[in-house]
Each structure stands twice: as structure tokens, then as C-alpha cells.
Amino acid sequence: MAAKEELYAKVTPRRQRQSRPSTVKHGSTLDVLLSMGFPKTRALKALVSTGGKNVQAACDWLFSHVDDPFLDDPLPREYVLYLRPSGPLLQQLSHFWQQSRLSCGKNKAHNIFPHITLCQFFMCADDKVEALTEALLTTVAKWKGRIPMPLPLELYTSSTFIGLFVEEQMAEGLKGFASDFATEAAAKADVHVEPHKKQLHVTLAYHFQTSHLPTLEKLAKSVDVSSGCDWLAVLYSRDIRFANHETLQVMYPYVPQNEDELELMPGDFIFMAPGEQSSASEGWVYGTSLATGLSRLLPENYVNRADESDTWVVHGSHSMTTCASPSNYGSAVAGSLLDGQLGDSLLDSFMTSPGHAGLCPPMQVSGPTSQLSPSKMRLFVCRHGERMDVVFGKHWITQCFDSKGRYVRSNLNMPSSLPARSGGHRDYDKDCPITVFGSTQARLVGEALSESNTTVDFVYCSPSLRCVQTAQHILQGLQLEGKTKIRVEPGLFEWTKWVSGTSLPVWIPPAELAAANMSVDTTYRPHIPISKLAVSETYDNYISRSFQVTREILVESKNLGKGNTVLIVAHASSLEACTRQIQGLSPQSSKDFVQVVRKIPYLGFCACEEMGETGVWQLVDPPILPLTHGPNHTFNWREMLMQD
């Protein structure tokens, strides 16, 4: 790989290039890049990664990927041909997409926009992509106007799948189009394309919870399949290396504090492989940046889950009817690409054609729509507040404690004092406190519960200091500090496999917590004592432990007869592990469990309610709104304001 300095040396400075536009006007885009001194393999990779529409986009891609370890990797991209709806039918489907996601959460269908699959994914060498796009153009020209519109679609539902199937005779015509494209692609680009042989359809939902079927089916029946539609044949590509990764989108900028951390720019996408997360501590994930190709650690609260197709690249889009110009539409697609990504502007362009209304806006909620009944047993499960070690890094202890173990904060977001520990301040390494903002988060939740007239009768929490402190500040917000005692339950600790090293944390005993002015019940006898916890327990053991302790907590609280609302303050994993089996559901696989847990933010809050006297529970709307906030980075005035 060429050094960064060598790569920059080969390129005329951008300002000078702009003063000579003639160099961009003559010759192909590839010729322009080659004339700048870029190696052909890199120039081709940049073009296919950005859609091949723009010299500047390709140059920017090369500059940002100069340190990409796979820059010279010959592995080609994967391609697929879809039919995409536009016009009124897209409005209908987009409305279904939004409402189904709001009502039932994300299912597998949401990973990709509404479409009909015409062929399987196939690979094409970078130097053959131009020929591949010509093959699509030739095939569209041959078939334009031969397929009657609108396509006849029929709704089909089952317990695990909902879709719109193309009428059989019409589907055979579309399969003929796909077969002709495969023939053209083989002749022009020397690639093997496998046309889709199964029934052609638009997937509306699949891999959803059985309980969501009635809602999804009702929404699907509201889709008017006779709506006008211009179907577009669109050729997409994706990076094959990340085909089975989870896609995340960066929401906030992040400047690395250590060499193994990734710089984050809003709008960038991160590819995360579940199997590569063993080296990441809680609050961090290991991923690869789409913008740079670099792989590093990053804070998980700076990213949101995105859809798989958000990172796909468009290589050609053509109308299947005679009333629209493929060249005009192609330019619209090219204008919507930002570094090769298909942005929201493309969807907007579908929706803003004359006479068509825009997307149906998401439902607006002015307040929490609580379904909680005051007479039933209720369970709230809440994650702890912002952690010190996630915000200030793993070495915050050495920064804040002197050689005699005296604590002095170095940032306003650090607490002014910390509880004394009989084992010394090094015990904070595995049992960190929450930040000042973490305390504020917890207090806001408590105040919101109070404002909604919600009472909390029993509070149980994990022995982790961050959980005890969070519970304490929730009680402050509820104005119950000193009135309701916190029961420290070791059985609520997170999956011990996630604890680094060969030993569990050394937690502060309840008596010492009470001595530090925390409202802890020193007479409480745990259901699962610390001695019963094992290092590196199996996933099944953790799930079984969480279910057992939750069930025993609920029985104990009910038998005491002093109230009907239980609050558990523990870890992100607790929102899933403590609620799933009491609903009568089977545990998820460990892989799916981890994916759910990684998306639960600080003070993530869920509510369950017992269904009569059956002993079975159901998730219901919490009585409070969610808590969302952005990051605030360290500001060093000397470095920022005293530069030469």
C-alpha cells in the first residue's frame, strides 16, 4: 500500500483542479482518475464504491480510504437486481413500513426497502461493472412497455410472513426479463446471474413476534395494491465483507482518546460483527467505518441501528414503462448519492412527483400512553446511568486517585466525592460509579415517575455501585429517599461472562453503602447470594438465574402486601433477561440476545403487568417518556485556543 504522503503527492491540489474544469470534461471518469496518477485497481474500486457517477466522489473516497487495510484487496462487490415501486404505491408501502415499525418494532423486512427480487446476489469484477450496467440498459430497452402496469398483487399472510405476491402469469413475464438480463450480463460482463425462481413478491414483514400478527395483518390489508406505480429496475451493490454484519449509523462526532478507538463523523455507517465483540468492554463495540475502512473500538451510545440497505450503492435505475425516461431518472439517482450511499433524498424524489402526497409522517405522541392498571402487579426494569469508565476511559482511576488513594475529580462530570471502599480504590476498576450526568439521568426518571403519579413500592437492584447509585437518585426524583429502601440483590448482576479477568468485582457491602448515606435495606436477605455467582457462567445459567430471581422477587413483593409496583435497577441485559420468560416466551439465542442488549441506552426503561392471577405477564407502555440526549466532548482550551 502506498504511503499517505505518496498518494497525496500524486494528486493536484483540489483548488487547482477546480480552476481547470476541462480535465474533467474530456475522457471517461476512469481516464481522469488515471491521469491523476491513481493506480487502476484503486481507481476502479473508488468508482464502483461511489456509483461511478462523479470524479470528485471517487477522489474523496480514495483520500478517506488511504489507510484502509483492504484498499488493494481484489475482492469484488456483490450485486443484485430489484424492482422498486414508485409513486402512489410507494406511498402506501412506506406508510406500512412506518406504522408497522412504530406499532410492533423492527422486523427483518425493515432491513431493506420495498422491492421485488429478480435475481440472487452475484459478484462482478470492478473492471466489468460498466459492462454490467450496459447489460441492464439493453435489457430494459428490450422489455420497456411489455409488462402491463400496475402489477397485480395479492396479499398473503402466515404466522411468520406477510407479503404481496405477483400474479403468476405476470410473474412469468418478469422472470423472462430477469433471464434476459442474466444472458446479457454473461455476454457483456462475463458474470453468472441466477434469476429468481421462486414466487415473486414484495415482503411486508417476517421474523416478527406471533403476538404482532393481528396488528401487522390489519396494516397490510390497508395497503391499496391497485395504486398507480412505475416499477423501476435498479441495480445495487454491497461490500460482500459486511453482508452478515449489523449496520449502525453514527449520530454524534467522536474524537479518539486512545489508539484503538475509531474517529466518528455523523452520517457515517459502521459495520459490526457480533462475533468480534469479545474484546469490547461494556458500552463499547468493535466495528469498521464505511467512510474510511478502518476497524476500531467506538462508544455504542454514539451510534444508532440502521438498515442493511442504507449502505448499498446504485449502479443503474430504469423505468419499466414507456412514460418515464430512464436517463432522467438515472440523473435523479446520481444526484441523491452521497459518497455512494442511497440517501433519503431518493425516497423523497419518489414521493414528490406531481399529484402525489408526501410520506405519511410518524405518529406524534404528546405524552406516554400508559396502559398500566393501578390494581395489578407491575414490574419496572431500568438500566443504570452513565458510567465513569465509559465516559473517561479505563484509566480514570489513575487520573483521579493519588498515591495515597485520595480522590480528586478532574472534570465537572465526575462526582465531587466517592464512597470509601474497605478494599481500597482499586476496587473501582471493576465496580465503577456513575457520572454526575448519570445521577441527573436517574433523577429525571424519578421525577417523571412522580409527575405521572406512579408509585414505587419495592426497589431491588444489582450489587454494582452504578446500579445502587442510579436507584438512589431515582428515589430522590420520586421524593422517596429514606422512605423506600433499596434491596441489593446479587442475583440481578449481569452475565458474568462479560466480566474481565478471573474474578468477580468486589462490591461495597450493604452496611457500608448505608454508612455512605444510601437508602439501602441492611436487613434484606438476597435470594441468590454472592457466593452462588460463578465467573464466566454459561448463557443458559445467566438466563435461568435472571428468571429465577425475578420470579422470586415478584412473589416476595406480592406476599408482603405493601404495594403492587416493583422497580428493578440493574443492567442493559436485565431488561430482556428479567422480562422475557415471565411473559411465557422462550429465551432468545445468545446471539440475538446480545444484539438486543447492545441497543439499550442508559436509563432504558420497560414496564410489565401481570395478566390477572394467571402468573403470566405482558409488556406494556411505560408511564414515562424515553430519555434521549447527545454527547459533550472534553474541551481543552489550551490546545484549541492557544495554537500557533
Image: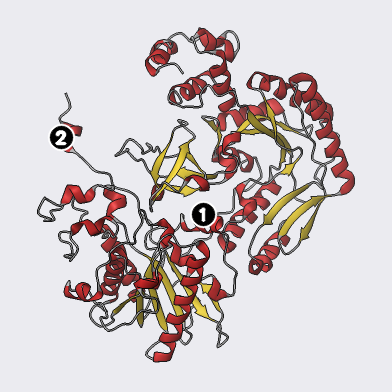
Question: The residue tagged with tag 2: helix, strand or loop?
Answer: helix
Relative to 442, residue 563 above or below: below
Q: Position of residue 461 (x, y in %)?
A: 35, 72
Q: Position of residue 266 (x, y in %)?
A: 41, 40
Amino acid type at mark 1: Gln
Question: The residue tagged with tag 1: helix, strand or loop?
Answer: helix
Relative to 199, residue 48 above or below: above
In the image: residue 503, left or right of residue 335: left
Residue extending furthest right? Answer: 169
Task: Identify the residue under disc 2.
Answer: 638
Q: In the rendered structure, are the residues bearing label 2 and label 1 in contact, judged by CB atoms less than 8 Å apart?
A: no
Q: Nearer the viewer, residue 12 or 80?
A: 80
Relative to 441, residue 554 above or below: below
Q: Position of residue 463 (x, y in %)?
A: 32, 69
In the image: residue 166, left or right of residue 573: right
Task: Identify the residue under disc 1.
Answer: 595
Instruction: Tell me, yes or no, if residue 456 can be seen here.
Output: no
Amino acid type at mark 2: Arg
Residue 644: quadrant of the picture: top left
Q: Residue at x 55, y 72 (%)?
A: 581
Residue 508: quadrant of the picture: bottom left
Which labelled disc corresponds to residue 483?
Answer: none
Relative to 28, residue 600 above or below: below
Q: How is the image coloured?
A: secondary structure
Labels 2 and 1: the sequence-earlier one = 1
In the image: residue 475, left or right of residue 567: left
Q: Residue at x 77, y 39 (%)?
A: 118
